[in-house]
Image (tube, coloured by chain):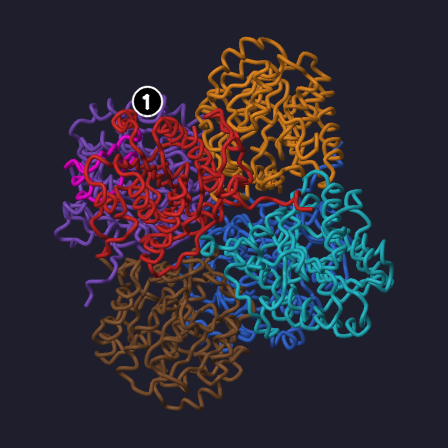
Chain colours: A red, B cyan, C blue, D orange, E brown, F purple
Amino acid sequence: MNNNVLSTKFLGCDSDFSSAEIVIFGAPYDGTTTFRPGTRFAPSAMRIDSIGIETYSPYFDADITDFTVNDFGDLDLPFGSPKKALSMISETAEYIFSNNKKPLMIGGEHLVSLPAIQQAVKKYPGLKIIHFDAHTDLRQDYLGEALSHSSVIRRVWDILGDNSIWQFGIRSGTREEFYWSREGHTSMCLHNFDTLGTAVEEIGGSPVYLTIDLDVLDPSNFPGTGTPEAGGVSFAQLIAALKTVSKLNIIGADIVELSPHYDHSGASTALACKVLREVLLAMSI
Amino acid sequence: MNNNVLSTKFLGCDSDFSSAEIVIFGAPYDGTTTFRPGTRFAPSAMRIDSIGIETYSPYFDADITDFTVNDFGDLDLPFGSPKKALSMISETAEYIFSNNKKPLMIGGEHLVSLPAIQQAVKKYPGLKIIHFDAHTDLRQDYLGEALSHSSVIRRVWDILGDNSIWQFGIRSGTREEFYWSREGHTSMCLHNFDTLGTAVEEIGGSPVYLTIDLDVLDPSNFPGTGTPEAGGVSFAQLIAALKTVSKLNIIGADIVELSPHYDHSGASTALACKVLREVLLAMSI
Amino acid sequence: MNNNVLSTKFLGCDSDFSSAEIVIFGAPYDGTTTFRPGTRFAPSAMRIDSIGIETYSPYFDADITDFTVNDFGDLDLPFGSPKKALSMISETAEYIFSNNKKPLMIGGEHLVSLPAIQQAVKKYPGLKIIHFDAHTDLRQDYLGEALSHSSVIRRVWDILGDNSIWQFGIRSGTREEFYWSREGHTSMCLHNFDTLGTAVEEIGGSPVYLTIDLDVLDPSNFPGTGTPEAGGVSFAQLIAALKTVSKLNIIGADIVELSPHYDHSGASTALACKVLREVLLAMSI
Amino acid sequence: MNNNVLSTKFLGCDSDFSSAEIVIFGAPYDGTTTFRPGTRFAPSAMRIDSIGIETYSPYFDADITDFTVNDFGDLDLPFGSPKKALSMISETAEYIFSNNKKPLMIGGEHLVSLPAIQQAVKKYPGLKIIHFDAHTDLRQDYLGEALSHSSVIRRVWDILGDNSIWQFGIRSGTREEFYWSREGHTSMCLHNFDTLGTAVEEIGGSPVYLTIDLDVLDPSNFPGTGTPEAGGVSFAQLIAALKTVSKLNIIGADIVELSPHYDHSGASTALACKVLREVLLAMSI
Amino acid sequence: MNNNVLSTKFLGCDSDFSSAEIVIFGAPYDGTTTFRPGTRFAPSAMRIDSIGIETYSPYFDADITDFTVNDFGDLDLPFGSPKKALSMISETAEYIFSNNKKPLMIGGEHLVSLPAIQQAVKKYPGLKIIHFDAHTDLRQDYLGEALSHSSVIRRVWDILGDNSIWQFGIRSGTREEFYWSREGHTSMCLHNFDTLGTAVEEIGGSPVYLTIDLDVLDPSNFPGTGTPEAGGVSFAQLIAALKTVSKLNIIGADIVELSPHYDHSGASTALACKVLREVLLAMSI
Amino acid sequence: MNNNVLSTKFLGCDSDFSSAEIVIFGAPYDGTTTFRPGTRFAPSAMRIDSIGIETYSPYFDADITDFTVNDFGDLDLPFGSPKKALSMISETAEYIFSNNKKPLMIGGEHLVSLPAIQQAVKKYPGLKIIHFDAHTDLRQDYLGEALSHSSVIRRVWDILGDNSIWQFGIRSGTREEFYWSREGHTSMCLHNFDTLGTAVEEIGGSPVYLTIDLDVLDPSNFPGTGTPEAGGVSFAQLIAALKTVSKLNIIGADIVELSPHYDHSGASTALACKVLREVLLAMSI
């Protein structure tokens, strides 16, 4: 009697956890967001609107129904306590990695990437990071707080050190962050994805975690985010970049910073669903 | 590992179908809506926002966690074919009644009530209808179509005849509809719920189907609907009416015509979730 | 071949000018609005949305199709020059009065009432004004400008003098305005419509111009206005007031200050259309 | 006395039907839309906002006041019955073609193109179709319904067969649709308008019907549509394409899928009005 | 040269700190909000929109220009660390009390009241609390966090104990919270302000801190809040309540939980500005 | 005690007037806007949202904290009287120029540029104008009014004559305006900024006033404006143009036509703040 009921899964992905190669889960946390919060609503909005997205990608000429994907659900995270929230995300990521599956996390703010990357590097020493973003995210701290959406990649660097992080699409930050990167701590590309091909060659077969802050996109493509930064990449450029990174050994990924309430047209949420589909395929092919 | 995952059920209602007394399901159909469509989005919006509603009602001094309620999901209904859509709703209602459970349907436009009532009367001969609405819904047809949101109660009358339908909160319709009712075909109360107490006495122990078009509420309380009609009842008046009808033998109910995209504040969806809670309690107590 | 084409008239009113008793026209001007402009969009928004309103009023038990009403269209008024705009409205009002018809004007900001009242008093010496509003509108001037939405009733007083103006629903203004009124220049009712019955008795058979600033309504009923003032009347109270004033000899009327872009739900525009219907009936019965 | 009244015509086009070469009409139907409805509001929104558009096109260096265009109005179509709605559109298209005029239809959803094309091919055997869209629209049926916005071009193919349909801007559909096209049934261009020049050469002097689903545009340019698909063409690319197709013998055209309520900025409606102007010129020059 | 520049102060209040009797300041913190954040935007939105509010209150027949009020500005509070944020608010409140002035704080979420009340009770032993709210706010903790918007009054009770807290307008909470209050820990009025007169008598001349969660208002009056709860008080009822409490010895107050982005009409922000004016007068008269 | 209070200055610019090289001020006037008003809200919206913008520009590799900039505040301008409003702007511009500082004005509609340019040419004979805009703004008058947003550059030409005005990004106007320009009265570039390099060479060391109507940007980048014109430049193109004009001797500038209420995402306001930063740097370097 249940066969005419609409799915509440991302893109209809309904594989069991045990049989799945990739596990999607939501981390609806935005507790350290300084300007406009609201990324906590991204996972639930994407679940609903993913019903309007085809499962077939003409870009990859592939269909996500060809792969086994589990939708784990969205974590119930406590606001007011970043540490507790990060600890719960950490447990979930560890559980997925320990079952030899690849996590694909939906934020939330960018800070949620930290515990996932911490677990990734435990599982995959020698991990490399591909980071798409408008912002440097390299602050030492924000108003004294070391755990902040604007310092998340700096915290990742604390773990991985130099020669591990490639940043693309960056166009906003303090002078100190840009200059610190230039000292050789990260590879930062200010002109969209111009050096991505080179990065892929350098990384070769190393395990890679891909973290996509969707505000890497131009606000014309993606107004539904807390801190829209004019001058970003187009969707077409992002798709091309995903095709490039699909050659890498991606062992985990995340998509963060959709804030659906700030785009009443729904176009930002629809785009995020499509990026989710393409990242899934980039990880699977 | 799943215990920290957020529920995707209405108000967290997660009883099995087999053990449940009440079964909630969504009928996201708005294919005959003439003015502003969008009620198709009501069930999914209510699922998400019901997370912000307490399970305890100070009005009934009761908690929905004290009762067994199943969330059946939302039907996948075809637009462009009212007949097929109604047929699918009909099957679902029949399935619920045949298992001796009470359906609580979330619309969609008001036409979705028709198949549920058709099944209710099959199960419960002598059925009476309590109808809360801004609109008469008594048109013989609309632009030649007999199946229309604005003729749904007339279609119910075709089945049940005179002395079966009590209408409350009515304030909009054609002159013909108002005069046809006055001929004795329905009991229509133009002043909010003034005669509800009398109706409850008249109905006594007969089985009752309660159909609530949420536009019975004043648009100040409930702007998120396709045809807002100024001059409606307040939420407090609706709660009082629900406490009155809770004395009846309600064997099924529905809540229709929330169109969530037309109220960006979310207040209409939050209110609809609260009405859902109160109707659940009115049916259970 | 044209019979299936939707009307672009207010409420479908399509009588010829020559045969009409009442002439509706739009005065989409908001050039002196100090806070949030946008009332210029009211006439066109009401034309479109009036399609969703029934022609039958259960309040008056009457139907506007029983009367002859012409929709004259919306004036093309120049922004940046209040004098020229008022002059064009004046000509239109004069034309309607000179043909022994009653104008029913849709604003625009409240200043548009001034030229209509100027023409009304020319035609009907001894004219009385019924004024529904949240604001006193009795400023001597605003930032030095004598022609302003916030001084319009003071300008009317300049013409008519004491014992001519009855104000209802007032709840915002400067201390000077309230005290000036108390000196006996206008009859100002601070408690909704409490003294309306008395006013109707005092006015008796004198010709009356009815000017309704829709912000007399509580913002809960009518958020779509430039300066929402909490604490206003309900739609039900406004309807009761209209039934009371329908006993008067209303020779002209206007409805002003709908700013449709500020209410995305459309409820404010729908309400304004309904008030238009009720005022039409109050003038006709 | 009427000379200062604002036009309610598209772009002020006020030629008589009899003298007009092109006839614009609205087909506000969205009854089979599966995701987000609302295209029914496009014609009325465009009428109002076209007041903000210049009549002169710097792209064509031409002015629409140089041509005779009639605005026929918007059809009053029944929701809940696609067949009846399509039949009424069919009659209107037939009436325009039979008077040797060119129809320019404003949707509504894409299904409204079907009856217009059916009449076009009756009048012009050997008709060719130029189709701009994000979606393939080649489904055999949708949830069992043969008449659906997502199967409209397949229905056109049922009439015209192979070698008759050129599709541009396509980037979303099922795998089956893409592969069916590749079998040679339609000419589908996945890279914007790359092959449009070739198509124009192939078509030569044959009669052409141009159907533009505005979601061919990137959602950054055009968020006001039901199913925004990232990765589309820019307005500048669309204008260039229109200049290219202006060399063809266009005997009818339509612009569909604007859903104005989903873009509160009004930019989508303004763009649609501009496309209307450019299509008018492309048909006239 | 500066005299034509618009004020950026609340209601134009520009007294020096040293000469002011009342000091307004903003506490834009919403870091523990569980459902929909955004109250951090309230102070800045109210500063701008207070330009549209008259300084004269017809309710109190008094003008705020008759009193000396300082606008201290908005605190720069760190998200992600409730403790640090509360500590900064605490310092500011202490500074104001130590200068023998009365603070009037604009939230932010309700948790910001805690440090202000902590400082108030230090200065004024025997302090009583008047609490207007839709929610009980009496949770022992929320997901393990003792510092939460939903436990703030329980934290106040930890300090003050029984017979110190009067709650009005309450209509949402867990069963446990309602029953805990009934044990005598707080005086909770479920029917609007019915027992407020009695409370004022009981309190007599004791020092009182007034904390107003604006969601005590019905969402029809005040949709711009994170958790709208149908069934609240009207603005008129709130004004009457403020006139009643103006008889008390109010030594500090706050207005919290305006979330301006959730009400595009601006009516909620305008109402909050008016409540600010009335609270100022209630504290001054 | 004041050090933790948020700045209410544009981008935190808090230099004294006397020591500042550049003076920012707001001219919130939109009284002659013909289509959709609302630019009056731009300065206050930009003040608030500029808090989310970094002070460092990666485009110029410079930081605005390296320069002395005064925020003068927003003028209190009378609606309904363009002459008086322009006179007040004129006084302010004169005051800034007479103190040998550079004004950077935030509109408001484009007409506000006229008095600023009038003062600029008094101070700097031989002044040249760089004009970025979607619209020609060369009308002789609008509905008889010589002072209008759509005739502002024509009024500037009245002062400066031929060979003084370079226009870029133009894509909308009447045929007459385009043809009048082609007669040699202005240099008009229809293809974005293609001839900007040439213009900069021609102008050389002459004093330049830069007037930026933000609708020069494509509506995809900047929907928050009254008359969005598809087909504009991208933010990246605008930045490149600003780097080019930074070689000129810019003695004053303005940024006009942001209408923040028409873009709920906030992306338009954020972009305008970023353009403000870049123009500041282009004037300073």
Which residue is drawn at the image coordinates 46% and 77% (left, top)? E59
Quadrant (top left, top right, bottom left, bottom right) of the C terminus of chain E = bottom left
The residue lying toward the viewer, choosing from B139 and E173, is E173
Task: Count the numbered circles shown.
Answer: 1
Work out whether D283 lies above or below C38.
above
Amino acid type, callout 1: Gly
Q: Is residue D110 magenta?
A: no
The secondary element bearing badge 1 is classed as: helix
Task: Place residue C16 in its image quadrant.
Answer: top right
The answer to whether residue C94 is left or right of residue E102 is right
The residue lying toward the viewer, choosing from F82 and A85, is A85
The residue lying toward the viewer, choosing from B49 and D50, is B49
> Label 1: how many residues lie within 10 Å, few (<14), some (14-19) or many (20+)?
few
Residue E266 visible in the current orientation: yes
The residue lying toward the viewer, choosing from D214 and E270, is D214
Which residue is drawn at the image coordinates 53% and 9% (left, top)? D201
> In x, y percent, where is residue E58?
45, 75
Quadrant (top left, top right, bottom left, bottom right) of the N terminus of chain E = bottom left
Q: Which residues are magenta?
A: A167-193
Q: Which residue is mark 1?
A: F184
> In x, y percent, where is residue B110?
71, 52
Task: Place residue F112 in its image quadrant.
Answer: top left
Mark 1 belongs to chain? F
Which residue is drawn at the image coordinates 20% and 36% (left, top)? F60
> In x, y percent, where is residue F274?
29, 42
> In x, y percent, where is residue E249?
36, 85
Residue F103 visible in the current orientation: no
